[in-house]
Image (cartoon, grey):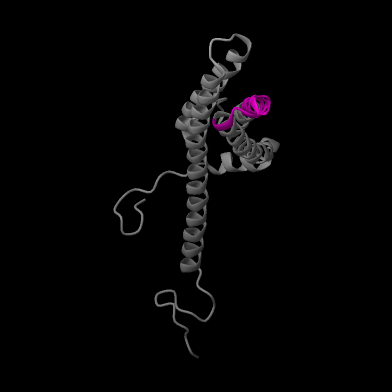
Amino acid sequence: MPSAGSGRKAPPPLYTPEQRKRRDETHWTLVQGILAPTQFLVFIISTWLVVRYLQTGEGLFWAHASIVLKTLILYTIMVTGAIWEKVVFGHYLFAKQFFWEDVVSMAVIALHTIYMASLFVAFLTVEQQMYLALVAYAIYVINAAQFILKLRAARLGEAAAKAQAATSASAENPPMGTSASTGSETRT
């Protein structure tokens, strides 16, 4: 259906009614709602610790610890997110509704995993590890923005659909004492 004035088709809704029902009923939605802001908070703190280490050479332990914590939360949110995606869309990952978000998530996971491997097999210098973490964080920000924009568009689309349904319902069943064709009050 074209959007008002644009001549373009509106994007399909993110969720079918059945998917929306599953999304609202599963506890994995709440889990994702808790883990996502937790991961973002750890990301902010870790970014500060990594940049501080790179600038001053101080706080290496805390920089490493924060990256490891961020990585563990990332792994947790990806596993629980895959379960959520299976419950809602029937695919553990790469459901068409979140395909590109999942692709970028895989890049974020790969970079974090390379960092973790470098802690156990010293194939990167400490500075390279820190810069790798910052690159992973930059891509994480892009990925987070993807999800936020997708979910915001879905919320706006749902609100528009509800408004359109309400408008259609009121046009079909005008309040008593009004005319459906003009919407003006009739006087008797």
| The image quarter in which residue 29 lies | top right
Residue 91 location, x and y as percent? 55, 26
- Residue positioned 61% across, 31% down in the render: 81
- Residue positioned 44% across, 77% down in the render: 183
Q: Is most of the magenta stretch helix, strand or loop? A: helix
- Residue positioned 47% across, 56% down in the render: 160
- Residue positioned 64% across, 43% down in the render: 24
Q: Which residues are magenta?
A: 55-75
Residue 28 location, x and y as percent? 67, 35
Residue 110 in sight from this viewpoint: no
- Residue positioned most to the bottom: 188
> In the image, is residue 169 above or below residue 106?
below
> In the image, is residue 141 above or below residue 135?
below
> In the image, is residue 103 above or below residue 113?
below
Is 73 in the magenta?
A: yes
Q: In the depicted view, which residue is nearer to us: 157 or 188? A: 157
Q: In the depicted view, which residue is nearer to us: 106 or 41? A: 41
Asked whether, in this view, residue 61 is left or right of residue 12, the answer is right
Asked whether, in this view, residue 147 is left or right of residue 4, the answer is right
- Residue positioned most to the left: 7
